[in-house]
Amino acid sequence: MKTHTLVVLLVLKGATLKAIGYFSAVGAESAALGGISLLPNYHSSSNHSALMPWLEKPGVAFTAANYYGVRNLNQINASAVIPIKTFGYGFGFFNYGNSNYTEQGLHFSVAHAFNKRFSLGLGGQYNVFKIANYGHQNNFVVDANIAAKVNEKIMLAFKVFNPTRTKLNSYSDERLQTVYSAGLHYKVNAQVKSYLQIEKVNAFQPNLKLGIDYAPKEYVHLRLGFSRIQPQFSIGAGFNHKKIKIDFASTIHPMLGISSQTTFVYAIGK
């Protein structure tokens, strides 16, 4: 029974593209926008660290996710960002799976905004991968991020995850995937923001991601997204009240069903 459960977890895990060391955007806001990672929020510590210095105050974010309604496919992420003048510092933790199959990781990042238009971020993540009765492996992955504000409406961003092609283990030459992504954020007006991102994983075909965020009120956000790989459609909403923000997202896979995420955000300070 344990072996059967493990096989199911691994198959579904492959569908979620969450293999150990593989980068995927964290948080319900990103999920609702098709997996867009270039969002200035408190999950930027792992999603796109170059955006951290442009946040106005320190804060924390906690996300709980479930994939396809399967009890054993749960993930939690906790992140924190501390912007200090032209610098930003980020920390985080994630846990995925159950006692049969587990992935855990600690990440940290630092970024520097050279001015109001250009920022550079660097990050590192220590991963632990465990399979019941088979032992565990660990590795360390780095990433680099750039963000540039062309003007008040347009922002460009670029990220490379695992440029060093970290080995999956010490006894073989199997290596983790390197992921390149480039994106565009266009502010249509005060209520509508649009996002486009192209992601390339080594030999795989590029993945196109699209997202749109509509804010009919200052404290309410409605979101739609699309990801070409698989393909997947997403929908979500966000609610703001002073220092607190709550985001919800549902991602629809045509064969496997619905995945859901909830993110709780708290901004620290006045």
Image: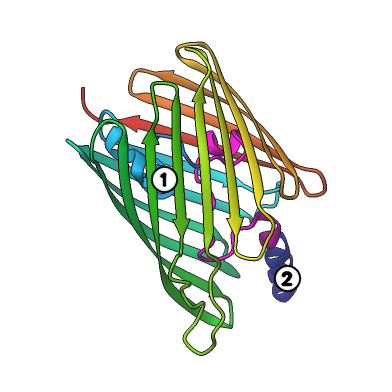
| Vertical arrangement, residue 178 with respect to residue 43, above or below | below
Q: Residue at x 60, y 34 (%)?
A: 32
Q: Does the magenta stretch include residue 187?
A: no
Q: Is the magenta stretch mostly helix, strand or loop?
A: loop
Side of 128 relative to 196 (left or right):
left
Badge 1 marks a residue whose secondary structure is loop
Q: Quadrant of the N terminus?
A: bottom right
Query: Which amino acid lies under the numbered mark 2 shown in the image of this protein?
Result: Val
Q: Is residue 31 magenta?
A: yes
Which residue in the protein does label 1 denote?
48
Query: Which amino acid lies under the numbered mark 1 shown in the image of this protein?
Result: His
Mark in front: 1 vs 2: 1
What percent of the width, then of the height, locates residue 207? 66, 49
Q: Residue at x 41, y 50 (%)?
A: 46
Side of 24 relative to 70 (left or right):
left
Q: Which of marks 1 and 2 is nearer the N terminus?
A: 2
Badge 1 vs badge 2, beta-carbon distance below 8 Å: no
Q: Which residue is drawn at 50% across and 13% down?
A: 189
Segment colored magenta: 13-36
Task: Please state the total of marks drawn on the protein image.
Answer: 2
Which image quarter: residue 228?
top right
Which image quarter: residue 3?
bottom right
Which residue in the protein does label 2 denote?
7
What percent of the width, then of the height, locates residue 128? 45, 70
What percent of the width, then of the height, locates residue 95? 48, 57
Mark 2, other Cα within 10 Å: few <14 / some 14–19 / many ≥20: some
